[in-house]
């Protein structure tokens, strides 16, 4: 019998930042793909009605009948919403615009903050990692992700307003920890779309190092046009152009993540 301790099975990672367009979905798609290529079994849960992560994996988001929406309102079991993809190690629970309704429909429901956690519970042990993409708000979908998660990845741009947003996010995380998920940790802050030629980037990096040094991923994701092209081909950047800077940097972040958890 194998008595070696396994890596903790089924680590749930939420990717959250209430600020829009900071690279949450790009990071979910490409970190998931990298973890898959490193031999991990990964479930991606697209909990954003925009469905960018869904289309990032080449899945059409129109007319979905087994998606995060059906799972959250209790119309379908998680297992029946999972679909396989052509990418190594990756399964997906997709999202479409119907999920926008969940936000409203759940307002009056009981246990509305724990829907995702409870729905995923039976299937989480089948995976090494579950990556959850969140919408750009601190609404009920993000709260569900933070309640379900073991750990949080915060993608952010290197801009002054991002620092203000981060303060707000850290405050919200404290609230969630205190009231609903005491063991939630921050796996790391990931700088995206970095442009080292800007003085401002350097200043913001200096601030981040001052306050969050131990939380920052050492690898920074540069601004790289290949990363923005890959989704229109419905594939993670590694499959689109494995020699691109974006592909290599996200692979580095995946390795760092494995060391951190
Ligand atoms: N490193 C990068 N270099 C260049 N473009 C990028 C990079 N990362 C993301 N992008 C592009 O920036 C835009 C926003 O990224 P993305 O959709 O991942 O952000 P998001 O935080 O998920 O947005 P939202 O808050 O709307 O969900 C997209 O068009 C994406 O292709
Ligand atoms: Mg997104």
Image: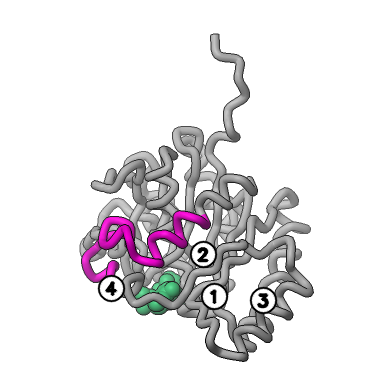
The answer to whether the residue bearing label 2 lies less than 8 angstroms from the nearest atom of ligand 1 is no
The answer to whether the residue bearing label 4 lies less than 8 angstroms from the nearest atom of ligand 1 is yes
Marks counted in the figure total: 4
Instruction: Name the mark on residue 141.
Output: 2
Q: CA distance from mark 3 to mark 1?
A: 13 Å
Q: Is residue 73 above or below residue 106?
A: above
Q: Residue at x 35, y 46 (%)?
A: 90
Q: Which residues are magenta?
A: 230-253
Looking at the rendered image, the disc whose residue lies closer to the viewer, 4 or 3, is: 4
Q: Position of residue 200 (x, y in %)?
A: 62, 90
Q: Main secondary structure of the magenta part?
A: helix
Looking at the rendered image, the disc whose residue lies closer to the viewer, 3 or 1, is: 3
- Judged from the image, the secondary structure of the residue bearing numbered disc 2 is helix
Residue that numbered label 3 is attached to: 166
Query: Where in the image, quadrant-wise, is ligand 2 located?
Result: bottom left
Q: Where is residue 218, by image quadrant?
A: bottom right
- Judged from the image, the secondary structure of the residue bearing numbered disc 4 is helix
Residue that numbered label 1 is attached to: 137
- Is residue 134 toward the left or the right of residue 82 in the image? right
- Is residue 228 toward the left or the right of residue 189 in the image? left
Q: Nearer the viewer, residue 194 or 52?
A: 194
Magenta includes 133?
Answer: no
Magenta includes 246?
Answer: yes
């Amino acid at each position: 019998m194998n008595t070696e301790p396994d890596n903790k099975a089924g680590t749930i990672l939420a990717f959250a930042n209430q600020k829009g367009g900071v690279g949450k979905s790009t990071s979910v798609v490409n970190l998931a793909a990298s973890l898959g290529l490193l031999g991990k079994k990964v479930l991606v849960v697209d909990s954003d009605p925009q469905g960018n992560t869904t289309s990032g994996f080449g899945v059409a988001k129109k007319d979905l009948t087994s998606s995060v929406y059906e799972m959250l309102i209790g119309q379908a079991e998680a297992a029946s919403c999972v679909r396989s993809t052509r990418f190594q190690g990756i399964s997906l629970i997709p999202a479409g615009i119907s999920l926008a309704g969940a936000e409203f429909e759940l307002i009056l429901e009981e246990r509305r903050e724990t829907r995702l956690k409870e729905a995923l519970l039976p299937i989480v042990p089948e995976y090494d990692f579950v990556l959850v993409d969140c919408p750009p708000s601190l609404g009920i979908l993000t709260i569900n992700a933070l309640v379900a998660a073991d750990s949080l990845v915060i993608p952010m741009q290197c801009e002054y307003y991002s620092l203000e947003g981060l303060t707000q996010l850290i405050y919200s995380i404290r609230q969630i920890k205190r009231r609903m998920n005491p063991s939630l940790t921050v796996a790391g802050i990931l700088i995206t779309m970095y442009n080292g030629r800007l003085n401002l980037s350097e200043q913001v990096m200096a601030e981040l190092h001052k306050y969050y040094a131990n939380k920052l991923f050492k690898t920074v994701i540069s601004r790289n046009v290949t990363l923005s092209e890959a989704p229109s081909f419905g594939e993670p950047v590694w499959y689109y152009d494995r020699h691109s800077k974006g592909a290599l940097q996200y692979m580095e972040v995946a390795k760092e993540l494995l060391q951190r958890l």
